[in-house]
C-alpha cells in the first residue's frame, strides 16, 4: 500500500513524524480523508479525533486541538495547539473538563459561549481518543 510523509507539529514540539497510508481528520466543514497523492490543500481543523493508518495496517489515534492540516507534494502537516496519544490522556481530568463546560453552557450566565463550546469539544475528543488506550492493551 502506498504511503506518504505525515507530521503533527504543536506549539511546544514536533509531536509525530511517520509514514502513513491515510489520515482521517476532523475538519471545520466535516470529517475528511487524506490519501497518498492528494492534491495540495489547506484544511481548517476543529478539536477532535485524528486517525492514521500505519503501513503495518494498524490504526493510530490522536486527540488534536484546533489548527490546520496542510497537504503538500512532499508531506502532509498538521499544525495544532495540542495533540495527545490515547495513553497520554488523563481521562478523569477530561471528564471534569467536560462537566465544567456542560455546566457553563447550561447556565449561560456571563460566559463566553464559543469558548465553553470549544472546551466541551476538546474534552469530548480527549475522552473518545482515551478509550483507544484501553482497547490497545
Image (spheres, rainbow, N blue to C red):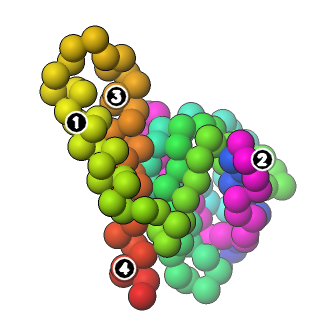
Mark nearest the camera among 1 and 2 is 1
Q: Are marks 3 and 2 in contact (CB under 8 Å)?
A: no
Rendered location of residue 35, percent (x, y): 61, 60
Q: Is residue 27 left or right of residue 80?
A: left
Residue at 56%, 34% in the rendered image: 44
The numbered mark at residue 72 is 2
Dot 1 or dot 2, earlier in sequence: 2
Between the C-alphas of marks 1 and 3, the distance is: 8 Å
Q: Which quarter shows the C terminus?
A: bottom left
Q: In terms of secondary structure, where does tag 1 sit?
A: helix
Q: In terms of secondary structure, where does tag 2 sit?
A: loop
Mark nearest the camera among 2 and 4 is 4
Task: Please indicate, yes or no, whether residue 77 appears anywhere in the rendered image.
Answer: no
Task: Please indicate, yes or no, whether residue 89 appears anywhere in the rendered image.
Answer: yes
The numbered mark at residue 44 is none
Q: Please provide the residue range marked out in magenta.
A: 11-33
Between the C-alphas of marks 1 and 2, the distance is: 38 Å
Which residue position is annotated with label 3?
116
Q: Is residue 108 left or right of residue 72?
A: left
Rendered location of residue 110, percent (x, y): 28, 11
Q: Is residue 77 left or right of residue 136?
A: right
Residue at 55%, 83% in the rendered image: 57
Dot 3 or dot 4, earlier in sequence: 3
Dot 2 or dot 4, earlier in sequence: 2
Between the C-alphas of marks 2 and 4, the distance is: 34 Å
Question: Does the magenta segment cover residue 59?
Answer: no
The numbered mark at residue 102 is 1
Rendered location of residue 26, percent (x, y): 46, 46
Which residue position is annotated with label 4?
134
- Please identify the dominant SS of the magenta region: strand
Amino acid at each position: 500500500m502506498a504511503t506518504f510523509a505525515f507530521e503533527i507539529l504543536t506549539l511546544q514540539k514536533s509531536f509525530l513524524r511517520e509514514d502513513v497510508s491515510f489520515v482521517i481528520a476532523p475538519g471545520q466543514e466535516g470529517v475528511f480523508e487524506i490519501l497518498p497523492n492528494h492534491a495540495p490543500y489547506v484544511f481548517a481543523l476543529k478539536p477532535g479525533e485524528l486517525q492514521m493508518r500505519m503501513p503495518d495496517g494498524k490504526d493510530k489515534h490522536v486527540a488534536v486541538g484546533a489548527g490546520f492540516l496542510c497537504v503538500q507534494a512532499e508531506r502532509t502537516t498538521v499544525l495544532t495547539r495540542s495533540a495527545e496519544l490515547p495513553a497520554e490522556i488523563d481521562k478523569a481530568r477530561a471528564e471534569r473538563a467536560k462537566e465544567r463546560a456542560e455546566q457553563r453552557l447550561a447556565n449561560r450566565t456571563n460566559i463566553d459561549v464559543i469558548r465553553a463550546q470549544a472546551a466541551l469539544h476538546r474534552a469530548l475528543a480527549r475522552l473518545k481518543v482515551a478509550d483507544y488506550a484501553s482497547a490497545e492493551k
